[in-house]
């Protein structure tokens, strides 16, 4: 395999709303990262209390060259704050500052900040432009791309939101150096998922380079992020609003979202829940005869090697069913799962309750 390039651009081709994902090092401080964005007087950076101390001033300085007014909204850190209250904090700032509909929002942070900023951008004055500046691995390979924006509700994750595309995604690899190891592992869950659902060769590459990825080695990391974004961009360009194909990106998420909601948001990181959910979905795929035990075992082993949980919390089988029944992929009360039906290929389908119960019983404790 050729050495991966740094400082690359991955286009996301959506009719009328296409944009670029820019991947490289030192991008926040580089002036050309922000060239060509919509013209405006004001820029508003939305971040959280952790990222503010690390990168907010760098971004504000870079933007001050292009915008007459740059202001900052600092939200509490954590999944538990992906709420109406935090969303209203953004709206309060925009209204108090008399921001107009040409104001550009910049989402500086992980998936929580990106989702809430995008949702605020979709709603404020019925839509203002926003830029994703993801600072976690999970956000760089998944949540910053594709235009899904949302907040959580106590009864379900990401149940209130909108599809709203950014005008650019700027993924600065240097921001990953300040991540705790737990966050790196959580991000790798979303990298791993792309292999079984879309590119079995990439899955084999991840298995071979996992230690390098955990160690944040520059070239393997850049390739993993680029390939993940290429796969997601291809899927999103064909199915922006998840009417069919895009659902495969939720491999592991039906079980994973149930874990997050059942434990309380923030108890497990999203990537931890997804990693465990992939193990459960692979087990279900095996039980339905879609894949063999060897492939299911490979998925379990790579999740374990990444430092992610492979055994879910014992919430109770009925509680799992209750929470999974609220999943956005469910139709008329029928729970549908993203399952692997061949190496590098996924499908969306329901499964007999008895098989799902067996999976939950075998993979929780």
Image (cartoon, rainbow, N blue to C red):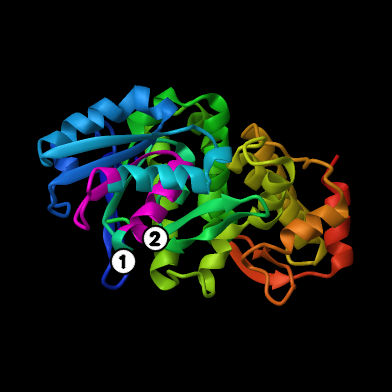
9 or 209, which is in the foreground? 9
- Residue 219, percent from left and from top: 37, 35
Q: Residues within 10 Å of mark 1 (few under 14, many from 20)?
A: some
Residue 199, percent from left and from top? 52, 58
Q: Which residue is mark 2?
A: 233
Drawn side of residue 361 relative to residue 13, left or right = right
Position of residue 297 relative to residue 80, above or below, is below
Going from N to C along the chain, the mark reached first, 2 or 1, is 1
Q: Cα distance, mark 2 to mark 1?
A: 7 Å
Is 96 placed left or right of 75 in the picture? left
Q: Quadrant of residue 171?
A: top left
SS class, disc 2:
helix
Residue range in magenta is 96-124
Residue 22 got which mark?
A: none
Residue 13 - label: 1
Q: Residue furthest front?
A: 96
Instruction: Residue at 29%, 73% (x, y): give it.
Output: 15
Q: Residue at 43% of width from left, 26% of height from top?
A: 50
- Residue at 80% x, 66% y is 288
| Residue 101 included in the magenta stretch of the image | yes
Whether residue 292 is visible to the viewer of this picture, yes or no, is no
Give coordinates of residue 213: x percent, y percent.
49, 33
Query: Do the residues under discs 2 and 1 have CB atoms within 8 angstroms?
Result: yes
Where is the N terminus found, in terms of image quarters? top left
* Label 2 crowd (10 A; few <14 / some 14-19 / many >=20): many
Q: Give the quadrant of residue 107.
A: top left
Count of marks, rendered view: 2
The answer to whether one can see residue 96 in this image is yes
Quadrant in the picture for residue 106: top left
157 or 27, nearer to the observer: 157
């Amino acid at each position: 395999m050729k050495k991966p390039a740094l400082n690359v651009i991955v286009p996301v081709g959506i009719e009328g709303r296409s944009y670029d994902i820019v991947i490289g090092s030192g991008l926040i401080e580089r002036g050309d990262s922000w060239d060509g964005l919509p013209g405006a007087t004001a820029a508003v950076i939305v971040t959280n209390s952790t990222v503010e101390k690390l990168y907010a001033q760098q971004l504000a300085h870079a933007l001050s060259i292009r915008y007459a007014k740059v202001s900052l909204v600092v939200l509490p850190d954590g999944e538990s704050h992906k709420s109406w209250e935090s969303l209203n904090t953004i709206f309060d700032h925009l209204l108090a500052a008399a921001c107009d509909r040409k104001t550009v929002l910049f989402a500086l942070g992980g998936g929580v900040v990106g989702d809430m900023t995008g949702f605020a951008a979709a709603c404020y004055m019925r839509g203002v432009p926003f830029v994703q500046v993801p600072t976690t691995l999970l956000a760089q390979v998944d949540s910053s791309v594709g235009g899904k924006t949302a907040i959580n509700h106590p009864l379900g994750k990401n149940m209130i939101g909108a599809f709203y595309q950014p005008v650019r995604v700027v993924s600065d690899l240097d921001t990953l150096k300040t991540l705790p190891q737990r966050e790196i592992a959580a991000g790798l869950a979303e990298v791993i998922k792309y292999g079984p659902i879309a590119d079995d060769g990439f899955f084999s590459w991840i298995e071979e380079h996992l230690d390098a990825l955990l160690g944040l080695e520059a070239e393997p990391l850049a390739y993993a992020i680029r390939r993940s974004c290429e796969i997601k961009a291809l899927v999103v360009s064909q199915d922006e609003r998840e009417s069919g194909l895009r659902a495969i990106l939720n491999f592991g998420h039906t079980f994973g979202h149930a874990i997050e909601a059942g434990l309380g948001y923030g108890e497990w990181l999203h990537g931890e829940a997804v990693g465990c959910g992939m193990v459960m979905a692979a087990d279900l795929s095996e039980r339905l005869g879609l894949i063999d035990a060897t492939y299911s075992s490979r998925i379990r082993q790579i999740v374990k090697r990444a430092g992610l949980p492979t055994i879910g919390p014992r919430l109770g089988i009925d509680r799992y069913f209750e929470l999974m029944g609220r999943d956005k992929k469910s139709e008329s009360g029928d729970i549908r799962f993203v399952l692997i039906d061949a190496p590098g290929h996924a499908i969306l389908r329901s499964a007999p309750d008895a098989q799902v119960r067996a999976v939950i019983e075998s993979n929780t404790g």
